[in-house]
Each structure stands twice: as C-alpha cells, then as structure tokens.
Amino acid sequence: MAALSDPFVPLLLAVAAPLLWGWRWRRPTWQMLVLGVGSWGAIGWLSLLPAGPSLCQSYDLLVVLDLLVVALALAVRPRQWRERLADPCLVRPLAAVLAPALLCAVALGMRGVILEFPSDGFVYYTTYFGSDLLNTVRLDPLHYRSPANWFFTAASYLFGFPEALAPWRASLLAALNTFLVLAASCQLSLRLSGTRALCWLTALLFLLGMGHQNFSFFHQIALNGTLPGLTLVLAASTPLLGLLQRPGWPGVRRLAQATAVLLVAGYFAYHAHGVTAYLTVNLLVACAAASLVLWPSGQRLGAAAAGAGLLLVALNRMPWHPRLESFYAWPETMRFVHDYRFLGHRFFYFWPSLPVATWEPVFLVALGLSVVCFALWRGWRQPPGAVLALALLGPLVLLEWWVPFVNDLVFKLIEPDSAYRLVWTSLFWISIPAMLWGLDQRWRWVSPRGRSRGRGLLIATIAGLIAVLAVPLQIRGRSNVFVSKVPHLLTPLEEVRQADGATIEPILGPLQDLCDRDPLLQGRTLLSDPYVGAVLGTRQCLSPVAARDITKLAASTVEAGQYPGLRRALASPATLRVWLDAQRVDVVVLRDAYVPYESRIARASNHWQPDLLTSYAELSLNSLSTAQLRRVGFRLVRHEQGLRVYLRTRAAPGSAPG
C-alpha cells in the first residue's frame, strides 16, 4: 500500500494501462491514445454529474480501473501475451510511431523546459501547477476555461502537484505531452502513408514549426493543454480519415460511427484547450468536402450546402468580438487584425504582421502543396481521399482568416489576438508528409523520368523548408521569419535562473507561516514588483498588487497601470499610509538588488523587452526604505535570499489608536 501512495504510481498506471491493453488485445494505436487521454477528460465530465464524485474521488476510481486493466493484460492467457510480444508486425509501429515520439520525449525530459517570466510556460508552472486544483476547480460543462480544465487537474494528480512543485516535474510533464502528441501524429501519418520516413518527418516538422510565433515549442507550450487536446482529436480522427482511403462508399453507418468518435473526443479536447474546437470543426468540414469529391451525391451536396449556409447566416447575425476595436490602438507593425470596406460593409481579415512568425514557412508550403494536389487531382488513378481532406485544411484556415462571413467564425467566437492559433488546425506537420506521399504516388503512374523529376522537386522543397526552419538568419539585424527556434533548444537552463522563479520561491515558506499565524491576512494584499507577485501568485494567502499582465509589462506601463498614484504617495508618510490602506496592503516584499539579466527569447521574439526584470529596479516601490515603512506601520520580519519581508503592525485588541 505504501507504493500506491507514491505520486508517480498514478502516472505509471495511466501510461501503462492503455499500452498494455492495446498491445495485448491487438488494438490500434489510436484507440490506446483515445482510451488513455480521453479517460483524463472523462474525469472532468464525471465530476460534473448531479451528486457525482469529486475530482479526487474520480481520479482514485481511475487508478482502480487502471490497476484492473494492467492485471488483466498481464495475467490472462500469458502464453498468448508472449506470442504478441514476439509478433513481427510490432516492429513497424515501434519504429515509426513509438521511436520518434519516445526519442523526443526523453530528450525533452532530460533537457528540461525554460520557465522564464513573463512567458506562458512560467504562468503554467507558477499558477496552475502551484494551486490546489483538485479541490478548488469546478469544470465548466460547456465553456472552455483555461485555468479550470481537465488537463491541469490531471497534471496536478498524475505528477503530485502542488505539494512537490519542482522544475524537473514540469520537465516530465512536458515530456509526457510531447510523447502523446507525437505518438498521435506519427500513428496518423503511418496509417495514411505506411512510410516510416514520413513519420520521422512528421515529428521533425512538428518540433521545428510548432509554437507561438518565434517561441520554441519545447520551451513555451509543452506545459499547455493544447497538446493533450491535439492528441485526443488526432487519434479520434483516424477512423474517419481511414474511411476516406477506401476505394468505395463505406456506408452511412460506418461514417456516422467514425464521426461520433471524433465529436465526442472533440468535446473533451475542447476542455483542454479551446482551439481544438476549431480543429474538430475543420476536420469535419474537410472530410465532408473530400467525401463529396470521392463519392458524388446531389442529395448530400444539397444538405451540406444548406448546413453551411445556415451556419454562415447564424454567424453573420452575431456581434463582433469586443476586442476587435482595441487593435486600432496598436502600432501597425504589431497589429494582427486589419479591416477593409466593400459594398458599404466592414470586413476584418487576419495575417500576423509581426516579423517573427516562424510557422509561416510551413503554412505557406502546406498551401503550395495543396494547390499542386488540387491541380493534379484528376490524374490520380486511385485518389487517396484522406490526402485530399488534409490538403483542404490549409485553404480552409486561409478562408477563416480572410473571407467575409466565413471569418466570422474567428472574429466573433475567438479572441482576435489568438487567431494565429488556427494555423495549428491546418495540421501542417501531418498534411505536408501526407501530401508528399500522395504526390509521389500520383507520379508513380507517369514515366520514370517524370517521376524522378517530381520526386526530386519534392525532396528539394522539403529540404529547403527544413533549412529555413532550422538555420537562423539575421536580416538587417532584426528578428524575421527566418529566425529559427533551434537556438532556443540550445539555451542553457542556468541562463534563465534569474527569471524562472527559483530566486523568489524561498520566500513562499515564510509567507505561509505568516498566513498560518494570522488568519486576518487571508484575502489581503501583497505589495511587490510584478515578477515577485507572479511567482507568489495564488500559492499563498495574499493577493499581489501587481503580477504578470501582458498589457502592462514594461516598467513605465507597470508604474502607471499597476501602481497608480504610488509615486506621488511617497511624498509623505500620511499620503503613503492612505495609498497602502486603499490597496489593503498588509505585506510588502522588496528585493535588495536586481541582477542584470537579458532574455534571449525576448530578443528573438520582440514579445517583451529583454532587460524587463532588471528594469523593475526603476519602479517607485523600490525607493521604499525600512525607515519609511516603519513610519507607516510596517516592520521588517524577514531578510534572507536578498528579499525583505515587511508586515503591517496590528494594534492589540482594545488598545486606543495612536
């Protein structure tokens, strides 16, 4: 029983149970992934039932079920189990699916992730994995909410958060997410093409091309719920895409079953990250369009056109997203969203104008290959329907960004500054290898000379794309589309220690002691710089005056936006006391010194000023002295690790005010 209390036992069971079940009973990889990842999403649904179990109870039930699956897989008919392990058919999925996914996951687990303020990875680490999510989170049954989704609760349970929060656990979580999404991607590539080399290309394109603008996938989003959500949708789309590879009409029943699998998985995936809803919709649209090309039917075409028309009319009647107007205050070089007028109507369109969107090359190559596939479609002897569906995804994303009424789907249902995430729904890391394979199959039927030329062109295209993604170039000394993410993988983790929270976390224990000794501190406010406030965040009883706010990051905007009036209040003890009382400040945390720090990722991406942390030394709060704070009722209670903690002195009960 002691072994079951180890925080990694649920993790080992959650990984082992679907793998053993699938290999023992010869189930396809996509079913293993749907069972494994989908069970985490189902926990959130189970806890929402009337009088249903709590999250902790639901996860305990999952552990029991995983134990039963493992016991059955190992104990039932052991001779057949040994024969299954010796099956030569296992070699192919092991080499094409498990090997690339496991290699990348192990590399990331050993390498570690960069948790640098104010990046998203820093927020996931310090906030979501530093909170007691299992006891406080209530999942929304319909609407996606980032801090309250099943991915963060599952991570908290499987990895023993938050009691043992540590960067190495975050690295293991990132490794698991990497393994899952690459396993799902490679299994889909293998299912469609049957070629091992293209599975490895799938993994390479994902790692080089995936990420938020110029941020490395490894360092920035490996702790995000996007990856488990993508895993679930990719695995669940395999049956539907597999039916499109068949030469004949599979029948309404089989199509309905495959669509139902994708819809159910898409619902759970949506609660891991909202962008997966667009991926589910786009896959359904692309598969429906491909099926109409493969198996023409006037009745189905009419139904599809009517459904699309009703959807566009419904979207057109919805109001624009309120944040659209805020983009007009942005400099033109920083704007994502633009507009134009046609026939008296105002239309919006999207294209990232920041010169750091390193996924643009893969997206443009995917679009180019789509055009080639469409142009050569009639020349296919046995047209691969799944390749056609994947070729439709890139143009569909472009329609959602640019075409009036169609892009209402984006500008009315998603925050405009998140519209870039729709590029993920093009599945470029899977669609590019699939289209390469499809075109190679198409040219197999032409003359040997023509096939040789076509294959040479494809190889040159993919080699050029990999070179663009992997080799960093500086044009006019500025970040640009050719700034590769590869250097991020080579950034020493020690380089970002000043920005990953490690220097601030030692103060968590003393603050918790203060909270335990004085219950009146609960819900009161902590005054510190934004970096300190973001590290402490929700991991103690006090609420920071300032924390990570992406609209107020620079020292000047922080001063005006997060500490309004503080500089003037420093003029006298009376005005300072009034300001502190208005902010309900009971604890002040100040740093002795700000070590010079330059962020390599900030220099490459232009998302925040590279010397951001150092610039916080210029904030007015850092001019506060012990003597000043003593005059307004604060005393120094702790001074260690370069941090000073001041506590408001409370009057004794019944004493007269001084």
Image: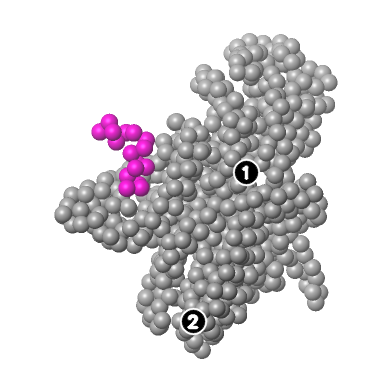
Looking at this view, is 205 or 594 the one in front? 205
Which amino acid lies under the numbered mark 2 shown in the image of this protein? Trp
- Image quarter for residue 407? bottom right
Q: Residues within 10 Å of mark 1 (few under 14, many from 20)?
A: some
Position above or below: 377 against 116: below
Q: Residue at x 44, y 31 (%)?
A: 163
Magenta range is 1-16
Please indicate whether residue 380 sits to the left or right of residue 500 in the image. left
Disc 1 secondary structure class: helix
Residue 272 visible in image: no
Q: In the picture, which quadrant includes the N terminus?
A: top left
Residue 305 visible in image: yes
Looking at this view, is 557 or 11 the one in front? 11
- Image quarter for residue 263? bottom left
- Image quarter for residue 159? top left
Measured as percent of width and height from the top left, residue 12 is found at 34, 42
Where is mark 2, residue-wise?
445
Q: In the picture, which quadrant includes the C terminus?
A: top right
Looking at this view, is 99 or 512 the one in front? 99
Q: Residues within 10 Å of mark 2 (few under 14, many from 20)?
A: few
Q: Residue at x 60, y 25 (%)?
A: 503
Determine contact: label 2, label 1, CB under 8 Å: no
Please indicate whether residue 645 sits to the left or right of residue 433 in the image. right
Looking at this view, is 166 or 102 the one in front? 102
Q: Earlier in the sequence, mark 2 or mark 1?
A: 2
Where is mark 1, residue-wise?
487
